[in-house]
Amino acid sequence: MKNNKYIKLTPSQALLKAANYCAYQERCHNEVLEKLSEWGIWGIDAQEILLTLIEQNYLNEERFAIAFAGGKFRVKHWGKVKIKLELKQRDISEFCLNKALNEISDQDYLHTLNEQIDKKWAETKDKNLLSKRAKVARYVIGKGFEQDLIWNILRNKSD
């Protein structure tokens, strides 16, 4: 059986396929370049397709960053630290990264952090208050929330 992961397309076929790929959901430049390489398009051809997608507004780094940050925050309840790291991993510019993080309202952010802390607090069956606080803190730090915000909330927590 043949492995169909790598398909050789012409640049015009790849452009159409990439436009559909970008129209389906927001993509970053790296995702599109990776997909183009799977289709056998590299170098100048890939860069020209990328430029065409940007010009035709199929590909927009700022729009991707805002959609990514909003989605990860609302659906997965990620904090800004984790979102920022993920966006940096995708080579998103500092400007777009900051714009995306600023789209998350402080009120919603604190509300979500409090919800995550309360949820984990209720699940944690530790009798020792310090140990329980530490477990809850590790959990929400792992979700990407800032330590100072976490500890401000946890200092006031008791059973």
Image (cartoon, rainbow, N blue to C red):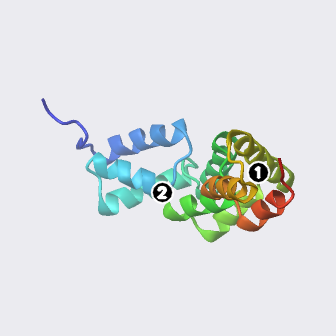
| 3 shown above or below 98 | above
Amino acid type, residue under disc 2 in the picture = His
Tell me residue 150's x, y (percent).
Answer: 76, 60
Q: What element carries label 1?
A: helix
Q: Mark 1: give few (<14), some (14-19) or many (20+) Cα within 10 Å.
A: many
Left or right, 92 with respect to 67, comes to left
Residue 122: give x, y in percent of width and height: 74, 40
Q: Say which label, 1 or 2, has the lower sequence index.
A: 2
Which residue shows up at 33% across the image and 40% down it?
Answer: 13
Does residue 151 appear to the left or right of 17 in the view shown? right
Nearer to us in this view, 139 or 94: 139
* Residue behind mark 1: 113
Residue at 53 percent across and 55 percent down: it is: 54
**Residue 44: where, in percent of width, then height?**
33, 63
The residue furthest front is 127
Crowdedness near tag 2: few (<14), some (14–19) or many (≥20) residues, C-alpha within 10 Å = some
Residue 40 location, x and y as percent? 25, 49
* The one of 156 and 63 positioned closer to us in this rendering: 156
Mark sitting on residue 29: 2
Q: Gap between marks 1 and 2, in whole Å?
A: 31 Å
Task: Using residue 103 as the reference point, say whether residue 52 is left or right of it.
Answer: left
Q: What residue type is labelled 1?
A: Leu
